[in-house]
Amino acid sequence: MMTDYDNSLAIDDVFLRKLITNSKLTMKKYDFFYIDPQSYSNLSVYDYNLLSHFDKQNLLYLHSKKYDYKSIEGWNEKSVFTYNSIANNNLKAISYVWSYIRIFFLIALYKPKVVHVQWFKLPSLDLLFVKLTKKLFGTQYVFTAHNVLPHNTGNRHVNIYKKLYHTVNRIIVHTPATVKEIISMFDISENKITVIPHGIIQLDIDEQIYRQSLSKWSEKYNTDGKIVFSSLGEQSRYKGIDLLAEVWAQTPELCQNDNLRLLIIGKQVNIDLSVLSACNNVIVENSRISNEEFYYLLKHTDVYVLPYRKISQSGALLTALSTRTPIAATNVGGLCDPLKVAPVGWEISGTTFKDIQQQLINISMSPDKIFAIKNNHADWEKINDYYAWHHISRTTMKLYQSMCDT
């Protein structure tokens, strides 16, 4: 009996035979390839918003079979990554290798001038692939360093990422702080790095489901008349959620204040939040939530808390900005960059217990300021303009074109 993986290999074999057979008939010119192995969930939102503002006639989008955002019908695109749907780690790796064999043939056929890669999932293989295609076809590579190193991996990948950063032609980062970090950690020339902000993430929601669930969520979360602090989505240590829990639980001004509500809603990853069990003004839910519920919670949040220990840029931050939700963020990576555009929240001066505690107490005593921030339309328009996707797309395409001119 054939497994799902056997079937995927059979399909890929058909793809390669068709590619070779029809190559003389399909010599459409693609100057640019855009590769995203993780193009689903928030990452498919990123790809769609970035690419939808491009002139896509000479760009080929290579994405995951799990792509799950708005329709890309009519785009030049191919679903090449299937590893995301395979449970076994060894089979995942084999599937990822096979995907890059497919991409190798596509590069050999179309010879794009620039290949833009969003994520490296098997860095050693990725490095080999980049070096090989640069040598054989003169391909130039752009890599978007969403994070300097993969989350929760410590220094395990420092050496291989140093080689990758030195091998690609250009690096895109989302914040000036990441530029400094890459230069310091990997001895990379600043001229090789371009800062292009990450755009605001608009959640894709089903309006009917949303409207039908409003009364249920209103009763469940009971936020009326309260100052609501929240952290939504995956909860983990690098995000500092364990520290947020300790601060709240050990601070009477927070945990014993009936005018406040803390919501920590989302799947917990290697983190223990049981310290909050004695706090009556806290709701903790260890499960994934739908886009509709996420959107509801953001719309009923007064302050979105980002007490990160380490990050380059945060999708949760950019989603909160889309609903004009004030933020309270540690000055880590690019978390406080929006505050340089407009005062739409508070900087937490450090990542210690005391730093977070003092700022949360301060905010909890400032309901008028929260209201003023939420309703300052001019400041939110500045945020929308700075993080607008059409600006980001234009800057990205200019980078591609500058590489073609050299």
Image: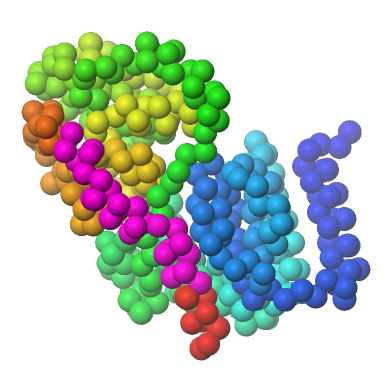
Where on the picture, by quarter, is residue 231?
top left
Q: Which colour scheme is used?
A: rainbow
Viewer-proximal residue among 351 and 217: 217
* Residue 195 visible, this angle: yes
x, y percent for residue 173: 38, 63
Report the front residue among 96 and 31.
31
Percent of width and height locating residue 342 = 21, 53
Residue name at image x 60 percent, y 45 percent: 70
Q: Residue at x 23, y 38 (%)?
A: 374
Question: Is-magenta flag for residue 377?
Answer: yes
Q: Position of residue 83 (x, y in %)?
A: 66, 46
Please report the residue visible at 34 percent of the width from the left and 19 percent of the height from the top.
284
Q: Is residue 369 left or right of residue 150?
A: left
**Residue 243 falls in which quadrant of the image?**
top left
Q: Relative to residue 189, is residue 251 depicted above or below?
A: above
Residue 3, magenta (yes or no): no
Query: Which segment is the magenta one?
Result: 371-397
- Position of residue 375 relative to residue 279, above or below, is below
Magenta residues, dominant SS class: helix
**Quarter of the picture holding the N terminus:** top right
Between residue 185 and residue 23, name the one nearer to us. Answer: 23
Q: Where is residue 114 in the image (x, y as percent from the top left)?
A: 58, 75
Label tally: 0
Residue drawn at the location 83% of the way across and 43% of the way down: 7
Q: Nearer the viewer, residue 94 or 99?
A: 99
Asked if residue 344 lies left or right of residue 214, the reply is left
Horizontal relation, residue 163 to residue 219: left or right: right
Where 145 falls versus 236 (above or below)? below
Please identify the residue farthest to the right as the structure is shown: 21
Residue 130 visible? The answer is no
